[in-house]
Amino acid sequence: MKVLVAEDDQLTRNGLVEVLRQEGYDVVPAETGAVAIDHFKQSQPDFVCLDIMMPQQNGYEVCRTLRQLNPDVPIIFISAKTEEVDKLAGFDVGADDFIEKPFSVREVIARIRAVTRRCYQRDQGRTPQSFVLADLEVFPHELRARRGETIVELSLRDVQILTLLHERPRQALDRNTIFNYAWGHNYFPSSRTLDQHISQLRKRIEHDPKSPTIIKTVHGVGYRYDPED
């Protein structure tokens, strides 16, 4: 899933890009409104994070243009302009949500996951409603899994990893295969990055993370899921 991040402040832009990439999104950064419009036309992102105060064209103007190009793409304003009149102006030009600066990483992740769920609901025919790994039922559209009454929140990358394991049961998946599927061909993380992510995911989905039954380690290769016969 691709996200356009339009933000003129380099520190904020880099922070948003890093957060989104860690969640599993393909991020297209833009430093001005004009660049954002060009990138939008070329990349056709699934949704947009948009600052208001930018050079050349402000966020309101960019939002109007994006709405003309695609009336359905979700747009989130992320701005230090937090007066009610600013928010209303944003919604008037077509924004779907508004995040105030300074923001917390948790808030951004929660809002982005909410947008992702809406995107999945819009494209329901492209992904399964749910699939089962052992006693865990995964709902890609919701970025969640359930075990009985327990709900597990998942990132987009978590869902991608679990989907790959489900699609290739009993196969020893090497690290490159997992990276290409869940991180993308243009991203080159280290083996430690994958191992750390799997470790954190196991803590949330396994009964005993030290003795996993869903994501098993294949020493010297990668990971595997063995469904029960």
Image (cartoon, helix red, strand yellow):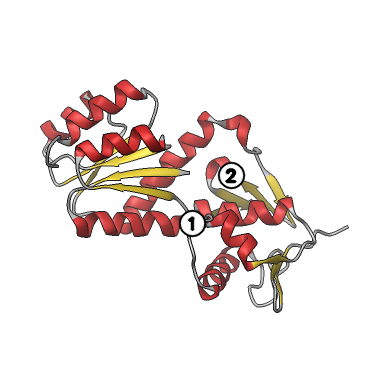
Residue 140's disc is: 2
Q: Which percent across, then down, holds residue 124?
A: 58, 31
Picture residue at 39% right of the left edge, 49% below the top: 27
Q: Is residue 36 left or right of residue 124?
A: left
Nearer to me, 201 or 27 = 27
Q: Which percent across, then down, holds residue 205?
A: 61, 62
Q: Residue furthest right?
A: 229
Is residue 151 at all visible to an observer of this figure? no
The quadrant where residue 15 appears: bottom left
Q: Is label 2 in a helix, a strand or a loop?
A: helix
Looking at marks 2 and 1 on the same chain, the residue that comes earlier in the sequence is marked by 2
Residue 227's disc is: none
On screen, residue 159 above or below 124: below
Picture residue at 41% right of the left edge, 39% below the top: 115
Nearer to me, 58 or 35 = 35
In space, the residues marked 2 and 1 are separated at their CA atoms by: 23 Å
Kindly identify the amino acid type of the residue bearing the numbered disc 1: Asn
Nearer to me, 13 or 133 = 13
Q: Is label 1 in a helix, a strand or a loop?
A: loop
Task: Check disc 2: other Cα within 10 Å, few if <14, some if 14-19, many if 20+.
Answer: many
Kindly identify the amino acid type of the residue bearing the numbered disc 2: Pro
Q: Which percent across, then down, holds residue 156?
A: 51, 51
Q: Is residue 189 left or right of residue 37?
A: right
Nearer the observer: mark 2 or 1; the answer is 1
What residue is pinned by disc 1? 186
On screen, residue 104 above or below 80: below
